[in-house]
Amino acid sequence: MRERIQNRNVEIAVIGLGYIGLPTAIMFANSGFNVTGYEIREEVVKKLNSGTAHIVEPEINKLLQEAIKSGKLRATSNPEDIKNKDVYIICVQTPLREDKTPNLEYLESAVKTVARAMKKGSMVIIESTVPPLTTVRMARLIETLTGLKAGEDFYMVHAPERVMPGRIFKELVYNSRILGGITRESADLAEILYRTFVKGQIFKTDPTTSEMVKLMENTFRDVNIALANEFAFLAHQYGINIFEAIELANTHPRVKIHIPGIGVGGHCLPKDPYLLLSSAKEDFGLIKKAREINEDMPLMAKDLLFEAFKMINLPPEEAVVTVLGLAYKGNSDDTRNSPAYVFIEAIQDDVKEVRSYDPYVSGTHETLEEAVKDSDAIVIATDHSQFKKLNWEELGKLMRNKILIDGRHVIDKPPKGFIFKGIGRGEY
Ligand SMILES: NC(=O)c1ccc[n+]([C@@H]2O[C@H](COP(=O)([O-])OP(=O)(O)OC[C@H]3O[C@@H](n4cnc5c(N)ncnc54)[C@H](O)[C@@H]3O)[C@@H](O)[C@H]2O)c1
């Protein structure tokens, strides 16, 4: 298999063509491999084969068209089309259920599809983020369904994906990668495969370690954001600006405090800490507590808003509130798990009207002026660059009352004439 991979002489099937699977399929196709993308959503398959991507990502349409035109990539919904491939790369979603336990239905269904299609000697790679011990369990499932033995009759690897949307095609090449092989030979072969386009470092380990590594990375960030949020909460009680305090603390050579804010959104950070805990019998409670703190941050923004209503004796049920930003991060259209929605849900039954404006997200007010006209309060929920350059004097003229709540540290100096409150801005 070694030489065949190096000569691009292996057939690859990528299972699940979403934010991760589609760019991965394109990368392998444009590196010279024959790639079949298997996706259950037929409308997505149709669109992709016509050369249009269904996700937003820089350069994706150009690279997709290159792959389709060269004949190296084809999408399909027919499991017959992925029979007897040499390599299967599983990139399906691994979300949480309502009760925060992992929903591995998509993964199990993809593994079963692969088990029906693969042959002796195939390599199965899971790129999805999964709870610890899942890859070993999936290897056992394949063994049961096929009668083949993992590590002897087929290779199995967990290869977690660490790319960030908006930079996927750069990071696919330059990020370092962790390959958790069920045997050393599995990891070695996967290294040869990824080395065909990866320029970053490649580290090899066992699958449970690689599952932990991926989950620890996102949990590290989530817990550190929760710590910054707790500092912000304390700053209100002590009457200081937490951002000044963090800047000063971060001058220490071994301190790097994260940024507090209205909440943590996106596809990964809000779910991965729960995936990390889900396979354990016991834990210390720190990770869960951090998650709860971050999930409650929109309520801290609500408290600030209602304190401001009180200051001007405005009954909340008469208030019109404009939320600036629905995306979970600045300059992005991604609204998955965005705290802006949690905030809106938390206030909408208590106030007269909630409006929103986000230049990147459809379905909000067309213009900022329209969204702000006659409203009583503006709440900044996303740090889009545009919001850092607003003319507050002019916006204030359009408003009925001038309350400004900054959930993302967009405002450096509170604008004149506004009642200003911000997360972590305890100073007056
Ligand atoms: N999006 C990110 O930024 C990111 C970053 C790192 C890791 N991850 C991880 O990568 C995995 C995939 O995430 P994503 O954002 O690409 O998800 P996604 O929802 O965008 O894509 C998953 C795709 O798989 C398809 N699918 C589901 N079940 C299938 C099946 N049985 N057979 C074929 N297709 C199937 C879905 O229709 C969908 O198109 C997740 O585990 C995620 O945690 C995502």
Image (cartoon, helix red, strand yellow):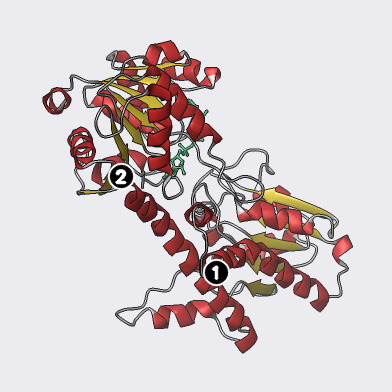
List x then y, in percent, for residue 106. 52, 33
Q: Which mark is residue 115?
A: none
Name the residue tied to disc 2. 171
List x then y, in percent, for residue 72. 28, 17
Q: In which image quadrant can residue 12 be found?
A: top left
- At mark 1, the secondary structure is loop
Q: Is residue 277 above or below residue 117?
A: below
List x then y, in percent, for residue 150. 30, 33
> Callout 2, which amino acid?
Glu
Name the residue tied to disc 1. 285
Q: Nearer the viewer, residue 171 or 38?
A: 38
Q: In which image quadrant can residue 359 be found?
A: top right
Q: Nearer the viewer, residue 234 or 388?
A: 234
At 69% from the left edge and 58% from the top edge, which residue is drawn? 343
Q: Position of 366 compared to 105: left or right?
A: right
At 72% from the left edge and 66% from the top edge, which residue is drawn? 302
The image quadrant where one finds the C terminus is bottom right
